[in-house]
Amino acid sequence: MSFDFTPFLRDDLPPAAKPWGGFAEFNFVGGHVNAASVPGPSLVEALAKVMQRDGDRLGYYGLGHGSQGYLPLREYIAQMLAERTGMPTDPGEILITTGSLQGMDLVNDALLQPGDTVILEAVNYGGQLSRLRKLGVNYVGIEVDEDGMKMDALEDVLAAQKAAGAMAKYIYTIPTVQNPSATVMSLPRRQKMLDLAREYGIPIFEDDCYAELLWEGERPQTIRSLDDQGQVIYCGTFSKTIAPSLRTGYLVADWSVLSRLMPLKTDGGCGALEQMALAEYCPDNYANLVAGIRQILKGKCEAMAEALGEQFGAAAEFSMPKGGLYIWVTLPAEVDTDRLTKIAGEQGVAINPGSEWAADADYGRRRLRVCFGHPSKQEIRDGIARLAEICHAEFGVPLRGANVER
Ligand SMILES: Cc1ncc(COP(=O)(O)O)c(C=O)c1O
């Protein structure tokens, strides 16, 4: 008989975790990348080199570079952001975090209290929505079109909040390859968002998680690069380009705010080996690696779009992503994707239900997100075929039969 902790546990703990049961046969959830693209041997080589040179730094907390993270990695990130996004950055304005999720936690911890409000894109990253709910924070979703968050709608909400004397604490945005809509905010809208933020005196939290995964063209200028007053806190990550298990992300902010976030990071510093390996590997290899990954992901995205078209026909509406890892799909109103997720999960197809990816869960109810980063093209074809069968059996969608055009 093992000791019973139940009476000792906090009343408000979340439900118990389940033991890991492995991935679904067809895994269309999460932000996994194309695992074969992870440069394992090159990272080992890089790590061996840097350990020879700098290994004794492991003898110090924070690698002897203070609590912001390994200095050569911050120097690389600063230079990369300047070159690739037009955002001159000082390594002293960067805090290395355990993935961008830790960055989000720090920002939320510093800015939010129960009852506060955050403004965000109406369809959104489930990990941020669940965090805000857990903190007792309200969120107001702003509609998104192909150019990203709609600025007239944002302006209306800001004006209404001001009139009510209840301004939101910040605007959260994923401007480039938004999750899950995959939209890219236009430059005029980026500027307009900053102008509105100025007018209403509210910070912006810019999450640039997917910005490297645009199929075509240059990476857009960040909102923070347009800002000369330190009103934008920025976060990035190596999760979607190199590997999510590295758990290496970063926050960029003016020192006045970074210095307030840092004391909330009480973990004694992020892991040394991943920071050192990245600092050594990235300067010569990052750009090439990412260029290759984009092409692979684009191919998988096309395979996913084709499979959805073939299997669901007109029943599956979606815009073709310009980058990223996901397609956001709208199905006919009779489909409840919460139920579909459950039944499909039991039959080996894992999908994300739209209700968890939308500020208004009801809006998400007929929508779903499918990730094409991890499965092979064949798995995409087979898995979407199985999903369509399951959806047809449960909801009569897509229509099936000799005379039905699919
Ligand atoms: C928009 C967004 N932000 C942050 C994260 C978390 O990423 P990380 O692995 O860097 O913690 C994700 C992961 O899917 C995401 O989609």
Image: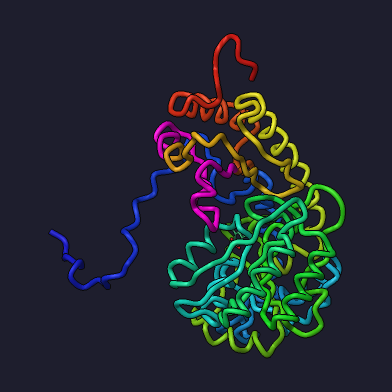
Q: Is residue 136 positioned above or below 294 on the image? A: below
Colour convention of the picture: rainbow
Q: Is residue 51 visible?
A: no
Q: Is residue 329 visible?
A: yes
Instruction: State ligand 1's quadrant.
Output: bottom right
Image location (x, y in percent) of residue 83 = 86, 68
- Give the answer, above or below, for where 171 lies relative to 29: below
153 magenta-colored: no
| Quarter the C terminus occupies | top right
Residue farthest toward the front in the current orientation of the protein: 163
Instruction: Determine if the magenta segment contains residue 357.
Output: yes
184 to the left or right of 328 = right
Indicate the position of residue 314 as horizontal and vertical percent values.
65, 28
Name the residue at 69% across, 47% down.
Answer: 37
Residue that protrudes farthest toward the left in the picture: 1
Q: Quadrant of residue 305?
A: top right
Frontmost residue, 73 versus 6 = 6
Q: Which residue is drawn at 44% across and 43% down?
A: 338
Magenta stretch bounds: 342-370
Q: Where is residue 195 in the image (x, y as percent from the top left)?
A: 79, 76
At x 62% / y 76%, what residue is drawn? 170
Specify whether 403 is left or right of 145.
left
Where residue 274 appears, as percent x and y from the top left, is: 62, 66
Quarter location, residue 318 = top right
Residue 362 versus residue 128: which sits nearer the camera?
362
**Residue 315: quadrant of the picture:** top right
* Residue 49 against residue 106 in the figure, above or below: above
Residue at the extreme top of the image, as rendered: 402
Q: Is 291 situated above or below 265?
A: above
Viewer-proximal residue among 76 and 199: 199
